[in-house]
Image (spheres, rainbow, N blue to C red):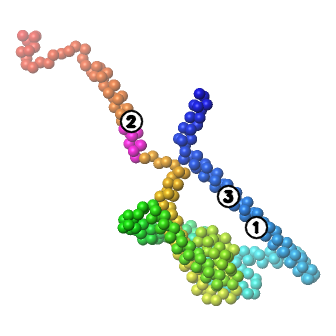
Amino acid sequence: MLQSLASNSCVRLIQSHKSTWYFVSLVLGYLLYLIFGAVVFSSVELPYEDLLRQQLRAIKKQFLQENECLTEERLEQFLKKALDASNYGVSILNNASANWNWDFTSALFFASTVLSTTGYGHTVPLSDGGKAFCIIYSVIGIPFTLLFLTAVVQRIMVFSTRRPIMYIHTRWGLSKPLVAIVHATLLATLAVSCFFLIPAAIFSALEENWNFLESFYFCFISLSTIGLGDYVPGEAANQRFRELYKVGITVYLILGLIVMLVVLETFCELQQLKQLRKIFYLKKEKPQDRLAILEHDHLSFTTVSNRATPQNEDKTQPFVSVPTLVSPNDDPMIQ
């Protein structure tokens, strides 16, 4: 008997806090997915890092043996300055000295990566004034960019998603959720083709050291605003039409980001995903529930008032009943 009561109370507790348990499971699932990614990346990339370290040590040792007049300390100082400059986008190589990082087209490309929060990190401000301006520019520009993208996506969604789905639903009488799923799948396929596959093929042809996988990797990292910065187009030595190339990449990034947001918003409007999201959200207080609470309070107040009314009436009645006089002749004292 006690076990059944305990189990029933546990079931009622779980059902009454179902949204909280779903949220806890979501947090645990996210942490497990994060740990899973760390384990996979570590197991895949750590051997390559160790191999690269061994190769660099061997090259350094061979260089010192071939140049005995150079000490290891002076070589370390030189390499440190070269690497620090490389972190700021400045290279000491002869074939890279012709490319400037802060001409107009490169600065335009940098501004687009800052406002879109992509941030490749291959070019950064060198001066204190540039760093201060970057902070102020980002504080104003990133909300401005979000407002701009939201307004553009809202207008595109009307013509790319809502009207086509409603037209097919009313014209052929098909199920609206089914039409929405098919439309979202076709839209995602078109976006992947036009902004991932075709640009990857173009980048692999224009960039000498990029294959198709690396070009596709750059497109995904850029349009998802991850922006690792290990692959940046237009940075090769003697790049033909470099200024025009940089402007084209800037336009590609802005248009691709808009298309990605349209696709994500289209999938977010699917009825199945809306129901899935509601599982993890806090339940809002419905107007019907609020009205029921108000009606219950009103009934309780009315009941209490009705109980108190007879007592008040008894208190206001006189102890001696006085007859009502219609005329002076009705008074016995006068008679």
Q: Classify 261 as above or below 247.
A: above
On whether residue 296 falls in the magenta region, the answer is yes
Marked residue nearer the N-terminal end (3 or 1): 3
Quarter of the rendering occupied by the C terminus = top left
Q: In which quarter of the view is residue 33 placed?
A: bottom right
- The residue located at (55%, 79%) in the rendering is 251
Asked if marks 2 and 3 touch (Cβ < 8 Å), the reply is no
Q: In which quarter of the view is residue 206 placed?
A: bottom right
Q: Classify 274 as above or below 285.
A: below
Q: Is residue 33 visible?
A: yes
Location of residue 218 in the rendering, given as x and y in whole percent from the top left corner: 64, 74
On whether residue 227 falls in the magenta region, the answer is no
Where does label 2 land, which residue? 297
**Element class at badge 3:** helix
Q: In which quarter of the view is residue 41 placed?
A: bottom right
Location of residue 102 in the rendering, given as x and y in whole percent from the top left corner: 64, 81
The kind of residue tagged 2 is Asp
Where does label 1 land, which residue? 45
Where does label 3 land, which residue? 34
